[in-house]
Amino acid sequence: MIFQRLAAVVLLTAAAPATARDVPDNIEQFYKNITSQNKCSDILASGFYSKDGDKPTSVYCGDHLRDYGVIYLRGEGKSLVNMDIDCDGAQKGSPADDGRCRASDDTLSISSFQDTIGSYGTGIKDIDAYVHPYVVFGNTGSKKDWATFNPTQHGIEPLSLMAVVCGGKLVYGIWADENGDDGDKPMVGEASISLATACYGKDKVDGNTGHDDDDVLYIAFLGKDAVPGATGADWNATSYDEFQSSVRELGDKLIERVGSSGGNWSAGGDGDDDSSAWVAGSPSLAASVAASLLICSSLVFI
């Protein structure tokens, strides 16, 4: 009986929904390592601002592009970047609309990958900032001397899953939008209102109020295995909790890259190679759970 109960606990743990999880040890150590360094050694693009009034010292960093298959944002010295609020995408009929996005004065009714989302055939035409936790990553623009960065040129796939460390928590978000040149400066550090709410609480953020401290870590994962696609996420979710739970398993698998031994990135690195893959030296969460269930099931019949 005790082994049957143990098997049930393992099943419940694997299936339990999670909105924002505690930061696991490997990601916490990664965060500490980055913020203990004064600069990025492999700068992929520079000249970005974390907030108005800053100097353009934020960069897209590739220090762990080859060993962990990740790209992240960081600032000058030991700082990272902040979290501004994005409310782009679907503007009407959100089942989770609580009015907070109305405080925003720069909302667009379209996201960068709207066409791809529509092609999924799930019934939605675009992301919903109140429901879908997403990250604004990459910078576009044609203004003179405007800093730009195209993540796909380094192997990051559109609508791939990212990990965000914020407010002492870990949240998974889709790369669903980019920073344009409609503002005065090329900015970085922005996420949907649903993601920001998971980090800091409903009373702390709205369409015009984000998190100003440069202590947020945005991690993007290289490769097609980071893309949930049409069936790997609950795009029709009616709440943040539902969507976050649907990508939890994939997110937990992706973060195993960070700090793993024996892992390496293999692919062309341009986002177009179907053979691109992450080869890790440690088992995934799903494999660990499956192994635990197998052991428990065997013990039940002993």
Image (cartoon, rainbow, N blue to C red):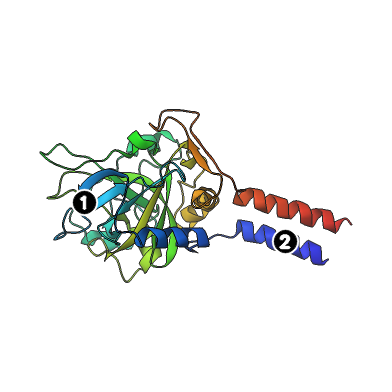
Question: Which image quarter is the C terminus in?
Answer: bottom right
Q: Which disc, if any, is residue 211?
A: none
Query: Residue 169 in the image: x percent, y percent?
Result: 44, 64
Question: Which image quarter is the N terminus in?
Answer: bottom right
Rate crowding at label 1 as few (under 14), some (14 to 19) or many (20 or more) other CA atoms within 10 Å: many
Q: Amino acid at mark 1?
A: Met
Q: Is 64 in front, or is 205?
A: 64
- Label 1 residue SS: loop
Q: Residue furthest bottom?
A: 203
Query: Residue 137 in the image: x percent, y percent?
Result: 31, 47
Q: Nearer the viewer, mark 2 or mark 1?
A: 1
Above or below, 57 relative to 32: above
Which residue is found at the position 65% from the left and 48% from the top?
287
Q: Amino acid at mark 2?
A: Ala
Which residue is found at the position 46% from the left and 47% from the top?
236
Residue 203: quarter of image = bottom left
Horizontal side of 299 relative to 222 (left or right) equals: right
Which residue is found at the position 30% from the left and 62% from the top?
78
Pointer 2 or 1: first along the chain: 2
Mark 2, residue position: 8
Q: State whether residue 76 appears in this view.
A: yes
Q: Residue furthest left?
A: 144
Rate crowding at label 2 as few (under 14), some (14 to 19) or many (20 or more) other CA atoms within 10 Å: some
Marks 2 and 1, how far apart at CA = 47 Å
Residue 181: quarter of image = top left
- Label 2 residue SS: helix
Mark 1, residue position: 187
Q: Is 130 in front, or is 198?
A: 198
